[in-house]
C-alpha cells in the first residue's frame, strides 16, 4: 500500500512539498533554508525512483522567472542612476569573478560544465540562476551542483560579512560617521520657522494664488488665525497678522520671509487631528503618475513621507511615479483622510486578487521574445524561455500600465506566484537530479563541496577588494552591496545589529535586482562552454 502511495504522482508531489516546507522552517543559529529545502527532500525521493512530469518544471519555471522580473524591474532601472553605477559595478564584479572561477574549477577538476554551472548558482544562493541553468543546459546535473554548493553559499556569506570588518581592520563607528556626513552633505538640512503675515501684497490671497511652494520650495504646514491653529489647504487665505509655519532649507526660508513677513517666536499649537497613515495604491487612475501630478499637497495639503515597494523602502520626491501595490505613508489632517484614501484607492481586496490576464499576456510576450534568434559570430543567439520571460517581465513592470491593463503585480500576489512556481520547479528538478545523486557524490563528493566553497569565497574576496580599494565605497555600503550581489537576504539580516545606519539596506536594494538579472545572463554564457 505504501509503495503504491509513493508512486502516486499527486501524493508524492505534496508529500515532498510538505516535508520540504517543514524542513525549511527549522532554524539553526537563526538561519533556515526556507522553500529551498524542498530540493533536498526531492533529491532523496528521486534517488528512490520518484519522478515528476517535465510539464511541472516548465510551468513552475515560467511563473517563478516572471515573478522575479516583475519584482526586479523597477529597481533594475533605478540602479543605474546617480551613484548607483558603482553599486551595479559591484554586482558585475561578484558575478563575473564567480563565473571565471567556475570555469577554472571545471577545467581543473574535470567537472562536467553542466554540473559546474549548478555549483555556480548554488554558491551564489540563486534559485533564478538554477532555473536558467536547467533551461539552458537541459540537464539535471545543474540541480545536483546547486544542492551541494547551496548550504555553504548561505552560511559563507553570513560569516564573511560578520568578520570582514576585522579582516580589513575597519571601524564600523567611523564608517557610520562618514556615511551620515555624506548623506547630510548631499541633502540640504530641512528646518522650520514661523513667520507673521505682514506683506500687504499677500493679504486676502490663498496659498494656491501665491504659489508659495513653487516660488520658495517650502511647505506651509501650519497656520494660526485668530488664535486658532489648523492645517492649511491650497485654498487657505492669508490675513494680516496670521502666523504660518514653513518647512524648508535655510536658503528657501529666507525667500518666505521676503514674501510673507518677518520671522517670529510665536508658537503654533499642534492639532490633535494631524495623522500619519499608510495607504495602498490601487486606484488605476494614478498608476504611473508622479506625485507632483496627483495634487497631493495642493488639494489635500498632504505629504508622502515614504513608499514601500516590493519589500524596499523608497524616499519619494515630486518625480516619483506610483506603482500598483505601493504602500505610501502620508502625513495630513484627519479631515482630509477620506479624500486621500479615495485618491489612492486603498482597496485591500483588489490588492489581494491576482489578475491572471496581464500575467498570461506578459508570459506570452516573453515566450515570443525568447524565440527571437540573432546570428552572431557564427552562433544563433536567443534569450530562450528564461531570458525571454524575464526580459518581458522587467520591461512590463517598468511600463506599469497599458490602457486598463496593469502589468505590475502587488507584492503579496507576486510572492504567491513566485512561491508556487518555485515549489513546482524545485520538486521536479530535485527528483530528476536525485536519480543521479549517489553516483555523482561517489565520484567526487568532497571535490564538489570544496569547489562550491571556493566559488563563494573568491567571488566575495574579489568584490570586497575591488569595492574597498578601487571604488572606495563606504564599508557599510560595500557590505550591503555584497549581500545584494550574492542575492543573500539572510546575510543582510545579519548586518542589522552591526550598524544603526541604513547604508547596507540602501546598497542591497540597488544591487539585488541587477544581480538577479546578471546571474541568469552569466548562467547562459557559461552554458556555451
Image (cartoon, rainbow, N blue to C red):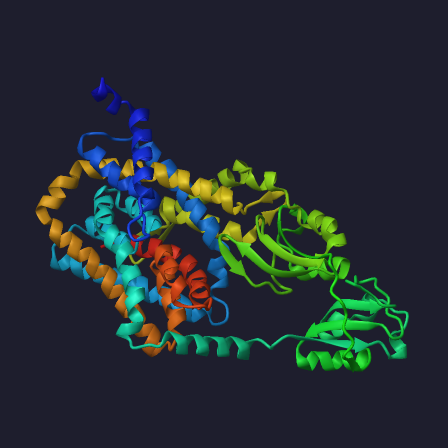
Viewer-nearest residue: 208 or 183:
183
- Residue 382: where, in percent of width, then height? 36, 50
Viewer-nearest residue: 93 or 184:
184
Answer left or right for 239 relative to 529. Answer: right
Q: Farthest residue toward the left?
A: 443
Q: Quadrant of the C terminus?
A: bottom left
Is 47 placed above or below 98 here?
above
- Residue 420: where, in percent of width, then height? 41, 38
Residue for point 56% across, 37% down: 353
Is 485 placed above or below 243 here?
above
- Residue 103: where, in percent of width, then height? 20, 59
Q: Is residue 117 in view from this perspective?
A: no
Viewer-nearest residue: 370 or 488:
488
Residue for point 60% across, 61% down: 320
Quadrant of residue 417 within the rendered picture = top left
- Residue 486: where, in percent of width, then height? 33, 59
Q: Quadrant of the N terminus?
A: top left
Q: Farthest residue toward the top?
A: 1
Viewer-nearest residue: 71 or 23:
23
Answer left or right for 76 relative to 214. Answer: left
Q: How many marks?
A: 0
Is 451 placed above or below 26 here?
below
Answer left or right for 291 relative to 200. Answer: left
Q: Is residue 36 in view from this perspective?
A: yes
Amino acid at each position: 500500500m505504501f509503495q503504491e502511495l509513493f508512486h502516486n504522482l499527486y501524493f508524492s508531489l505534496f508529500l515532498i512539498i510538505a516535508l520540504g516546507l517543514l524542513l525549511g522552517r527549522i532554524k539553526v543559529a537563526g538561519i533556515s533554508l526556507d522553500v529551498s529545502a524542498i530540493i533536498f527532500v526531492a533529491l532523496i525521493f528521486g534517488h528512490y525512483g520518484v519522478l515528476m512530469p517535465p510539464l511541472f518544471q516548465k510551468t513552475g519555471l515560467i511563473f517563478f522567472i516572471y515573478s522575479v522580473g516583475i519584482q526586479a524591474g523597477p529597481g533594475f532601472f533605478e540602479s543605474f542612476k546617480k551613484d548607483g553605477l558603482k553599486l551595479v559595478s559591484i554586482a558585475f564584479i561578484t558575478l563575473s569573478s564567480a563565473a571565471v572561477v567556475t570555469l577554472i574549477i571545471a577545467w581543473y577538476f574535470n567537472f562536467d560544465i553542466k554540473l559546474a554551472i549548478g555549483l555556480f548558482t548554488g554558491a551564489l544562493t540563486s534559485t533564478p540562476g538554477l532555473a536558467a541553468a536547467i533551461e539552458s543546459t537541459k540537464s539535471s546535473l545543474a540541480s545536483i551542483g546547486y544542492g551541494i554548493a547551496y548550504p555553504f553559499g548561505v552560511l559563507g556569506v553570513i560569516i564573511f560579512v560578520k568578520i570582514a570588518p576585522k579582516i580589513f581592520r575597519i571601524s564600523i563607528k567611523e564608517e557610520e560617521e562618514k556615511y551620515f556626513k555624506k548623506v547630510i552633505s548631499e541633502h540640504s538640512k530641512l528646518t522650520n520657522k514661523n513667520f507673521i503675515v505682514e506683506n500687504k501684497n499677500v493679504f486676502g490671497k490663498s496659498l494656491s494664488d501665491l504659489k508659495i511652494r513653487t516660488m520658495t520650495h517650502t511647505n506651509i504646514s501650519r497656520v494660526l488665525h485668530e488664535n486658532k491653529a489648523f492645517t492649511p489647504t491650497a485654498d487657505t487665505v492669508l490675513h494680516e497678522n496670521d502666523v504660518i509655519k514653513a518647512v524648508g532649507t535655510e536658503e528657501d526660508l529666507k525667500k518666505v520671509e521676503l514674501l510673507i513677513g518677518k520671522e517670529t517666536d510665536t508658537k503654533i499649537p499642534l492639532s490633535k487631528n494631524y495623522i500619519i497613515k499608510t495607504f495602498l495604491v490601487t486606484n488605476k487612475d494614478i498608476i504611473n503618475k508622479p506625485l507632483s501630478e496627483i495634487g497631493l499637497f495642493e488639494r489635500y495639503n498632504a505629504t508622502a513621507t515614504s513608499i514601500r515597494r516590493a519589500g524596499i523602502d523608497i524616499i519619494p520626491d515630486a518625480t516619483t511615479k506610483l506603482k500598483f501595490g505601493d504602500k505610501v505613508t502620508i502625513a495630513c489632517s484627519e479631515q482630509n483622510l477620506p479624500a486621500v484614501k479615495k485618491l489612492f484607492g486603498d482597496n485591500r481586496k483588489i490588492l489581494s486578487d491576482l489578475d491572471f490576464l496581464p500575467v498570461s499576456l506578459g508570459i506570452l510576450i516573453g515566450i515570443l521574445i525568447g524565440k527571437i534568434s540573432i546570428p552572431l559570430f557564427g552562433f544563433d543567439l536567443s534569450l530562450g524561455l528564461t531570458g525571454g520571460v524575464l526580459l518581458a517581465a522587467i520591461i512590463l513592470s517598468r511600463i506599469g500600465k497599458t490602457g486598463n491593463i496593469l502589468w505590475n503585480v502587488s507584492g503579496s500576489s507576486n510572492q504567491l506566484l513566485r512561491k508556487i512556481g518555485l515549489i513546482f520547479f524545485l520538486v521536479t528538478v530535485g527528483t530528476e537530479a536525485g536519480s543521479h545523486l549517489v553516483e555523482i557524490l561517489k565520484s567526487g563528493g568532497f571535490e564538489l563541496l570544496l569547489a562550491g566553497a571556493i566559488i563563494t569565497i573568491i567571488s566575495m574576496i574579489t568584490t570586497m577588494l575591488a569595492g574597498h580599494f578601487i571604488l572606495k565605497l563606504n564599508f557599510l555600503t560595500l557590505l550591503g552591496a555584497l549581500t545584494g550581489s550574492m542575492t543573500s537576504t539572510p546575510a543582510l539580516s545579519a548586518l542589522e545589529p552591526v550598524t544603526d545606519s541604513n547604508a547596507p539596506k540602501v546598497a542591497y536594494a540597488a544591487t539585488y535586482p541587477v544581480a538577479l538579472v546578471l546571474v541568469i545572463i552569466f548562467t547562459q554564457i557559461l552554458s556555451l562552454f
